[in-house]
Image (cartoon, grey):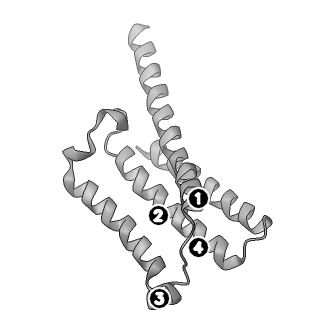
């Protein structure tokens, strides 16, 4: 489990840092880059929570409806963040702002990288375990 935690932390941290630097390099303001990075981190966690349900089984082998509280909590967490971006007083205090649908989808695509890496990790471990069983 420690290996999985370190790997996911490395992926999330590296992608978030690189996106932040890339946004600043592309002329985004400091506040816009922070805002996008925060949204990216929320998306990472909302995706990674489903991948963390099992250390060995693929996320695609688990129905999200099997744990309705997890699904509801994840949807609510995302809606709270989106709501905060659109609530005038709250967004000013938190210094966040709405992003375009295209930008949101781009960040979602980047956040899916943790799912891809962790699914590959599960496959490599399963392959390695199968090879040890054969030998």
Image quarter where the N terminus lies is top left
Crowding around mark 3 (Cα neighbors within 10 Å: few <14, some 14 to 19, many 20+) is few
Which one is in front, 39 or 120?
Answer: 39
C-alpha separation, residue under disc 2 versus residue under disc 4: 11 Å
Secondary structure at badge 4 equals helix
Please state the horizontal and vertical placement of residue 119, each as a whole percent of the image: 46, 35
Q: Which residue is mark 3?
A: 88
Residue linked to disc 2: 42
On the picture, is 120 further left or further right than 47? right
Which residue appears at 21% of the width and 49% of the height?
A: 67
Whether 78 is drawn above or below 11: the answer is below
Rendered image: mark on residue 35: 4
Indicate which disc, 4 or 1, sits on the residue closer to the N terminus: 4
Instruction: Please tell me which of labels 4 and 3 falls first in the chain.
Output: 4
Please give the residue where the numbered disc 1 appears in the rendered image.
Answer: 102
Between residue 12 and residue 110, name the one nearer to us: 110
Q: Quadrant of residue 82?
A: bottom left
The C terminus appears in which quarter of the rendering?
top left
Q: Residue furthest front?
A: 101
| Residue 116 location (% of width, % of height) | 51, 39
């Amino acid at each position: 489990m420690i290996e999985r935690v370190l790997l996911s932390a490395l992926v999330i941290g590296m992608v978030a840092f690189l996106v932040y630097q890339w946004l600043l390099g592309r002329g985004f303001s400091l506040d816009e880059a922070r805002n996008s990075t925060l949204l990216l981190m929320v998306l990472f966690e909302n995706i990674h929570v489903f991948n963390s349900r099992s250390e060995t089984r693929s996320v695609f082998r688990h129905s999200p409806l099997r744990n309705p509280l997890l699904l509801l909590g994840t949807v609510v967490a995302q809606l709270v963040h989106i709501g905060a971006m659109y609530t005038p007083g709250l967004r000013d205090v938190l210094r966040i702002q709405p992003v375009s649908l295209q930008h949101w989808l781009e960040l979602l695509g980047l956040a899916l990288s943790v799912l891809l890496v962790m699914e590959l990790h599960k496959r490599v471990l399963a392959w390695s375990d199968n090879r040890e069983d054969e030998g």
